[in-house]
Image (spheres, helix red, strand yellow):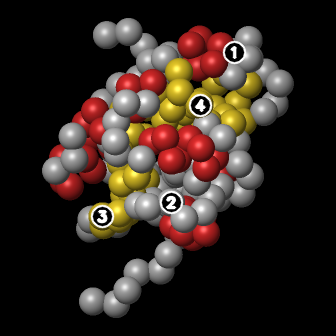
Amino acid sequence: MAKETKTNAMRFLEKNRIKYEEQSYECGEFVDGITTANALGQPLEKTFKTLVAHGKSGNYYCFLIPVDRELDLKKAAASVGEKSVELLPLKDLTAVTGYVRGGCTPIGMKKQFVTVIHNSAETLPEFWISGGRIGLQIKLSPKDLADAIRGKFADILLSR
């Protein structure tokens, strides 16, 4: 099997000497994070999805949350100092981030946006996020990620 092309996310991690592991899966189009985690045998609480939102200020933000949970838009807005945020329409995702749905990651976007990671990841030694294309997941330390992209941890989930 030919070696896969590195994504912007992988190049960024290597340039910054951040340890990571990659895991690929067969997938021709978008599948949700729960399906991805189950297919790869990854625990749902350690598999995070990247959501992109925009605030009233016009700024864009990334929020990383477990794949089986929902973002609380009020908590998300408060975590970035906005009055409110709205999820980015899917039709705008590639133009804003350079990534497609199912392959969006906070690493290596066209521009580095303020990123907030749900605080459940703060104590995890490692977690899984998209690797920058559909069919690729990356396992790395949440703290290493936060340090590299100047991200922060906060409670941004809807209550169950």
Q: Quadrant of the C terminus?
A: top left
How far apart in space, not on screen, are marks 1 and 2 (Cα)?
Answer: 33 Å
**Label whose residue precedes the other's in the sequence (2 or 4):** 2
**Label whose residue precedes the other's in the sequence (4 or 1):** 1
How far apart in space, not on screen, are marks 2 and 4 (Cα)?
Answer: 17 Å
Secondary structure type for disc 1: loop
Image marks 1 and 2: residues in contact by CB distance under 8 Å = no
Inspect the image, locate mark 4, and give the three-letter code of the amino acid beneath it: Lys
How far apart in space, not on screen, are marks 1 and 3 (Cα)?
Answer: 35 Å
Inspect the image, locate mark 1, and give the three-letter code of the amino acid beneath it: Ser
* Residue in the picture at 41% in, 61% down: 20
Mark 1 or mark 3, whichever is nearer to me? 3
Secondary structure type for disc 4: strand
- Choose top left, top right, bottom left or bottom right for residue 28: bottom left
Q: Which residue is mark 1?
A: 84
**Label whose residue precedes the other's in the sequence (1 or 2):** 2
Q: Which residue is mark 4?
A: 152
Q: Which residue is mark 2?
A: 18
23 relative to 49 in the view: left or right: left
